């Protein structure tokens, strides 16, 4: 089964990327894999404190994932898979794509702020020619209705 890999983070544009991935998966009988990355600098504390912070980060990710997963199951009949990795975002995304042969498309949401589309979109676009899968970039300000119309 072809999977759409989408990155879960706290950005506003993440919502449109999730919607797009779920709608495309539903239309193509594919799957959705949701990747969340915990940056390593969050745990540069004493060992015990770092372990507690790591567990709290995982709990926040799972809670955030469950909101999207419920919508995907209820509205799109897609049961997403959650992957949590620790490290720097770009290498972890690339590793996930290379390690899972079923990933067919990487879906990213583009930010609309003054800082441009966001660091992941910028970095991955620069390396798009060497990626093993295509990237779909979903505009952060695209309406839900417009997304539904194009999917």
Image (cartoon, rainbow, N blue to C red):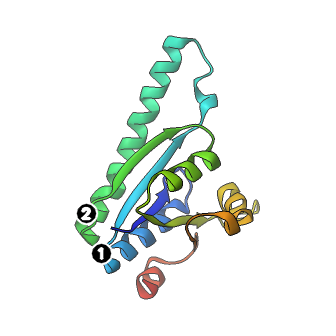
In terms of depth relative to the viewer, which is nearer, 87 or 10?
87
Q: Residue at 32% of width from left, 50% of height from top?
A: 66
**Residue 151: assigned label:** none
**Residue 103: percent from left, percent from top:** 44, 62
Q: Quadrant of the N terminus?
A: bottom left
> Within the image, what quadrant is residue 134 found in?
bottom right
Q: Secondary structure at mark 1?
A: loop
Image height of 100 relative to 19, above or below: above
User: Callout 1 environment at 10 Å: few (<14), some (14 to 19), or many (20+)?
Assistant: few
Image height of 117 relative to 36, above or below: below
**Residue 8: percent from left, percent from top:** 48, 52
**Residue 73: assigned label:** 2
> Viewed as shown, does residue 12 lie left or right of 120?
left
Residue tagged 1? 29
Q: Residue at 57% of width from left, 46% of height from top?
A: 92
User: Callout 2 environment at 10 Å: few (<14), some (14 to 19), or many (20+)?
Assistant: few
Nearer the observer: mark 1 or 2; the answer is 1
> Within the image, what quadrant is residue 2 found in?
bottom left
């Amino acid at each position: 089964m072809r999977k759409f890999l989408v990155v879960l983070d706290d950005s506003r544009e993440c919502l449109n990327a999730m919607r797009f991935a779920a709608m495309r998966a539903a239309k193509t009988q594919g799957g959705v894999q949701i990747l969340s990355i915990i940056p390593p600098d969050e745990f540069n504390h004493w060992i015990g404190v770092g372990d507690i912070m790591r567990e709290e980060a995982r709990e926040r990710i799972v809670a955030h994932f469950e909101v999207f997963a419920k919508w995907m199951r209820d509205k799109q009949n897609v049961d997403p898979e959650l992957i949590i990795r620790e490290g720097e975002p770009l290498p972890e995304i690339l590793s996930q794509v290379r390690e899972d042969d079923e990933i067919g498309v990487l879906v990213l949401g583009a930010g609309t702020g003054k800082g441009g589309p966001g660091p992941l979109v910028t970095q991955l676009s620069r390396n798009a020619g060497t990626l093993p899968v295509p990237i779909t970039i979903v505009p952060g300000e695209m309406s839900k209705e417009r997304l539904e119309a194009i999917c």
